């Protein structure tokens, strides 16, 4: 049986699927995987959360990376993998997508924001660290180009991109929602995560322990492959397009 056929059979039988995505789904859109060799963090030091908060020079550096698009996290277009996940959500085959990515590409491919759980936040907008007010980057860029410090216009708190930086705690509501989704699903489909860092390493096991089928699609083997019902080492876009075609024309 081909990989796509096997995956389509699992998806066809599933009623409450959850999709979990990592950097691998977005590298096919040209977004660098920041942890891998040659990735963003091998080119520059991450700015730790405490340094951002404590030091205006670090904040200046952080915003300069954002507005000079140094990290390359935003501005890419969704690929076939993102569109396939959105189609699974629309058809009710999957109830949610949990993502480690900050690139907003699930939403850009049409996934409703309330069905996307972002474990590491979102780099396409900013938030006040104190009151949570949302700011669009275009508006902040004008301030920054004018040499102004970027602070909240409501409470004067520090404003930062809505990502979870190194040293910043994982967002609690998102973690709870992700854990609950993993426990309640009947199929947990991993797309493009090496499943090494927490919580990516624990959610699939949580799903499996609660009776879900576990499917891992990743270019490289992962430490959780032995726990999976199906492992496919494949490119996500082509595989998911083929799988979607099999599901919709019913030729299983
Ligand atoms: Zn504020």
Image (cartoon, grey):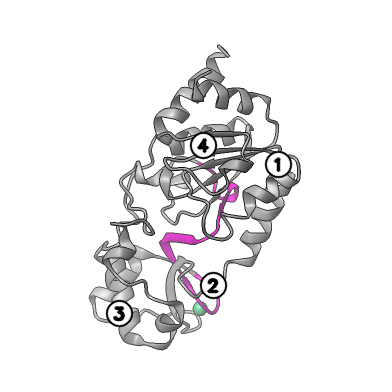
Between the residue at mark 4 and the residue at mark 1, the CA separation in whole angstroms equals 16 Å
Q: Residues within 10 Å of mark 3 (few under 14, many from 20)?
A: some
Q: Position of residue 196 (x, y in %)?
A: 51, 56
Does label 2 or label 4 sit earlier along the sequence?
A: 4
Residue nearest the viewer, comparing 194 with 167: 194
Q: Are marks 4 and 1 in contact (CB under 8 Å)?
A: no
Is residue 143 in view from this perspective? Answer: no
Q: What residue would you read off at disc 1? A: 185
**Residue projecting furthest to the front:** 226
Residue 219, quarter of the rendered image: top left
Name the residue that disc number 4 marks. Answer: 85
State whether residue 204 appears in this view. Answer: yes
Residue sitting at x 24%, y 78%: 146
143 and 178: which is toward the camera: 178
The spot of residue 157 in percent (x, y) is: 48, 83
Q: Position of residue 15 (x, y in %)?
A: 70, 31
Q: Which residue position is annotated with label 2?
A: 132
Q: Which residues are magenta?
A: 111-133
Q: Is residue 124 magenta?
A: yes
Q: Quadrant of the C terminus?
A: top right
Q: Is residue 178 left or right of residue 184?
A: left
* Label 2 – label 4 distance at C-alpha: 29 Å
């Amino acid at each position: 049986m081909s990989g796509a056929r096997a995956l389509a059979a699992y998806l066809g039988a599933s009623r409450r699927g959850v999709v979990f995505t990592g950097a691998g789904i977005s590298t096919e859109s040209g977004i660098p995987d920041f942890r891998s060799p040659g990735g963003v963090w091998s080119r520059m030091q991450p700015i730790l959360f405490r340094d951002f908060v404590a030091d205006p020079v670090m904040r200046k550096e952080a915003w300069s990376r954002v507005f000079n698009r140094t990290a390359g996290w935003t501005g890419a277009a969704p690929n076939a993998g993102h569109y396939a996940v959105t189609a699974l959500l629309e058809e009710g085959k999957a109830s949610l997508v949990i993502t480690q990515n900050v690139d907003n590409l699930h939403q850009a491919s049409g996934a409703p924001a309330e069905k996307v759980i972002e474990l590491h936040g979102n780099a396409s907008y900013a938030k006040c660290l104190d009151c949570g007010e949302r700011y669009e980057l275009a508006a902040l860029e004008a301030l920054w180009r004018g040499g102004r410090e970027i602070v909240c216009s409501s409470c004067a708190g520090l404003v930062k991109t809505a990502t979870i930086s190194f040293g910043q705690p994982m967002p609690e509501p998102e973690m709870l929602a992700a854990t609950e989704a993993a426990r309640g699903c009947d199929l947990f489909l991993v797309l493009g995560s090496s499943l090494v860092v927490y919580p990516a390493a624990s959610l699939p096991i949580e799903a499996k322990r609660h009776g879900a089928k576990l499917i891992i699609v990743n270019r490289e083997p992962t430490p959780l492959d032995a726990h999976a019902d199906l492992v496919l080492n494949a490119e996500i876009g082509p595989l998911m397009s083929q799988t979607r075609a099999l599901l919709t024309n019913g030729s299983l």
